[in-house]
């Protein structure tokens, strides 16, 4: 089996207990509660030369696992901040994460431009 690039997050087949995020021990890393810890890493990371239909099916199955995960938001933010270049993280594929990151960058630029414009108007006023 091919090892995912970040296999350290998907360790031992210890059943994760579904604990609400707000009640979780704040010192414990978010990934200790991840539902994917019980699943085969191959579901979340593509084998080499995977046919498109198989990839889409595998990604949808991985997203179904993510959808029931109590730390999906933390996982997604981790993948966006790193940024993780491979696999399904927080219910998003690598391509979907690139879209989210591009939108965030555009939004940041728009906000900076709006703040600059507001500053000029206030200075002129």
Image (cartoon, helix red, strand yellow):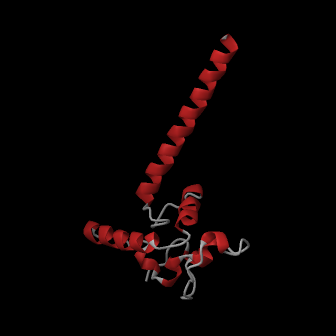
Instruction: Report which quarter residue 71 is drawn in.
Output: bottom right
Outermost residue toward the left in this view: 53
Say which residue appears at 57% left-offset and 88% top-offset: 14
Q: How many marks?
A: 0
Asked if residue 56 can be seen in this view, the reply is: yes
Instruction: Report which quarter residue 12 is drawn in.
Output: bottom right
Residue closer to the observer: 49 or 117: 117
User: Residue 41: horizontal and vertical position, in percent?
Assistant: 47, 79
Image quarter of the N terminus? bottom left
Describe residue 123's horizontal placement relative to residue 36 as left or right: right
Give above or below for 51 relative to 102. Answer: below
Say which residue appears at 44% left-offset and 69% top-offset: 67
User: Residue 119: horizontal and vertical position, in percent?
Assistant: 66, 21
User: Residue 47: horizontal and vertical position, in percent?
Assistant: 38, 74
Residue closer to the observer: 50 or 100: 100
Describe residue 116's horizontal placement relative to residue 101 as left or right: right
Give above or below for 108 relative to 68. Answer: above
Asked if residue 49 can be seen in this view, the reply is: no
Say which residue appears at 61% left-offset and 70% top-offset: 21
Outermost residue toward the right in this view: 27
Outermost residue toward the top in this view: 124
Residue closer to the observer: 4 or 80: 80
User: Residue 91: horizontal and vertical position, in percent?
Assistant: 45, 65
Say which residue appears at 55% left-offset and 66% top-offset: 75
Image quarter of the C terminus? top right
């Amino acid at each position: 089996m091919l090892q995912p690039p970040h296999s350290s997050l998907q360790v031992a087949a210890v059943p994760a207990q579904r604990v609400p995020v707000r009640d979780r021990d704040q010192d414990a890393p978010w990934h200790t509660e991840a539902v994917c810890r019980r699943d085969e890493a191959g579901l979340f990371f593509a084998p080499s030369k995977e046919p498109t239909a198989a990839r889409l099916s595998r990604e949808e199955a991985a997203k179904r696992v993510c959808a029931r995960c109590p730390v999906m938001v933390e996982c997604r933010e981790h993948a966006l901040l790193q940024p993780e270049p491979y696999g399904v993280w927080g219910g998003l594929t690598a391509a979907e994460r690139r879209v989210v990151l591009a939108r965030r960058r555009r939004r940041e630029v728009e906000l900076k431009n709006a703040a600059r414009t507001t500053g000029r108007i206030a200075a002129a006023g």
